[in-house]
Amino acid sequence: MSKKTKDTIIIGAALFAMFFGAGNLIFPPAIGLKAGNEWFMSLLGFIITGIGLPVLGIVAVSKAGGTIKDLAGKVNPLFASVLGTIIILAIGPLLAIPRTGATVYEIGIQPIFGSINPFIVSAVYFSITLFFVIKPSGIMDKIGKVLTPILLIVTLSIIIKGILFPIGTPVMTSITLPFSSGFTDGYQTMDALGSIVMASIVLVGLIEKGYTDKKEQIKLATRAGLIAGMGLLVIYGGLLYLGATSSSVYAADISKSALIINITNSVLGSLGQIGMCVVVSAACLTTSIGLTAVVGNYFVELTKNKLKYEWIVIFTTVFSAVMSVIGVEKLVMIAVPLLTLVYPVAIVLIILGLMDSYIKNKNVFKGAVFGALLISTIEALNLINISSEALLNTIERLPFANAGFAWVLPAIICGLVASLLPEKKLSIYKKPVLENI
């Protein structure tokens, strides 16, 4: 095996491990339970947001230059900084990183050790995270070589046995739009958002291994993304199907944590709880390590080294440790409005980033993002009970609104309209400012 192939596999495995974290573990079974015998259509929708977009996000950012600033900066620099900060906080100390700790406690620790203090578990868990992440050099190798194999072996054992000896059969449920339900449920993994900022750590990993040519970096990043995507497809498909087979066994309102615990115990018997503890700890820890490193690198760059990497990751782990005791279900509820706001924008940026070489007038970025953001803002405000009935009624009449894609047509229309205007008409910043940011 050549060095290039070996390096690509290691980075691809690390990407898989960072993507396959708390959300990826608890959401597919819940989606399968909700979908029942329509599980395959839900899987197709979930694959788009859970696999396709993250892989494409890595490629789009790599093509743009390697950072979220390079991609979102095509709208304007201030937008890139604001969007980047929102995404970093969402996939960082506010939601995703604490959720990994909460999931480890609820699924991996509490069923075995009972009423152990969650603060103790959180402190130990985030201390381990800090140990791995405090020195950024070699993070990709540490994750890819050490933790990924543990995650894969145990998870595949659960899936294979669950398929060979199913706990039940998929039954008809009350779901009406399985594809769109799976698509929007995929938001909760936050992987498309994560890919936009995780691309930078992939770039760091490639540079550390001696790959400095941009074309080669894009090529290897794409291959690594595809490796991660294939791994996720196997895991997602297996876990979602196991959830579907449980639709004839468990009530529809069972919590996500309880569902995955019960499925694992049913599949593995007395070894179920131990197996789940290993899976959850490995899955969540790899994600926590990767995301914490991304948070550190992002704010170092944003503040132009005024904030030290070590200070940022220490603060991130301490804050996440405190937030994690809130619990999985509450963190999921908090995430919904924020993801509803940001995800359509991220999707638009990823798609346009891939098509950038064919877009002559960059105002398309500004217009399309504005159209998507306008609709997603109204929908997000509605979720926190701040809404206008007239606006909501208008949105509900848009094509694809019932499927959760009301933002698609406004994004297309605004992008087309913006493409007809000279670029300077929509430019808030003068060119020298753009070059200095």
Image: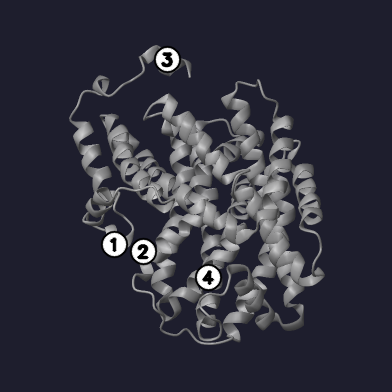
Q: In this view, does 63 lie to the left or right of 410?
A: right
Mark 4 or mark 1: which comes first in sequence? 4
Mark 3 or mark 2: which comes first in sequence? 2
Residue 118 lies in quadrant: bottom right
Mark 2 or mark 1: which comes first in sequence? 2
Which secondary structure, mark 3?
helix
Mark 3 or mark 1: which comes first in sequence? 1
Q: What residue type is labelled 3?
A: Val
In percent of width and height, residue 234 lies at 54, 67
Question: Dot 2: few (<14), some (14–19), or many (≥20) neighbours within 10 Å?
Answer: many
Q: Mark 4 — residue?
A: 30
Which secondary structure, mark 4?
helix
Q: Which amino acid does label 2 sit on?
A: Ser
- Which marked residue is nearer to the observer: mark 3 or mark 1? 1
Q: Residue at x 61, y 87 (%)?
A: 165
Q: Which amino acid does label 4 sit on?
A: Ala
Residue 3 appears in the picture as rendered: no
The residue closer to the viewer here, 220 or 168, is 168
Residue 270 lies in quadrant: bottom right
Q: Do the residues labelled 2 and 1 touch (CB within 8 Å)?
A: yes
Q: What residue type is labelled 1?
A: Asn
Question: Dot 3: few (<14), some (14–19), or many (≥20) neighbours within 10 Å?
Answer: few
Mark 4 or mark 2: which comes first in sequence? 4
Q: Mark 3 — residue?
A: 433
Mark 4 or mark 3: which comes first in sequence? 4
Which label sits on residue 402?
A: 1
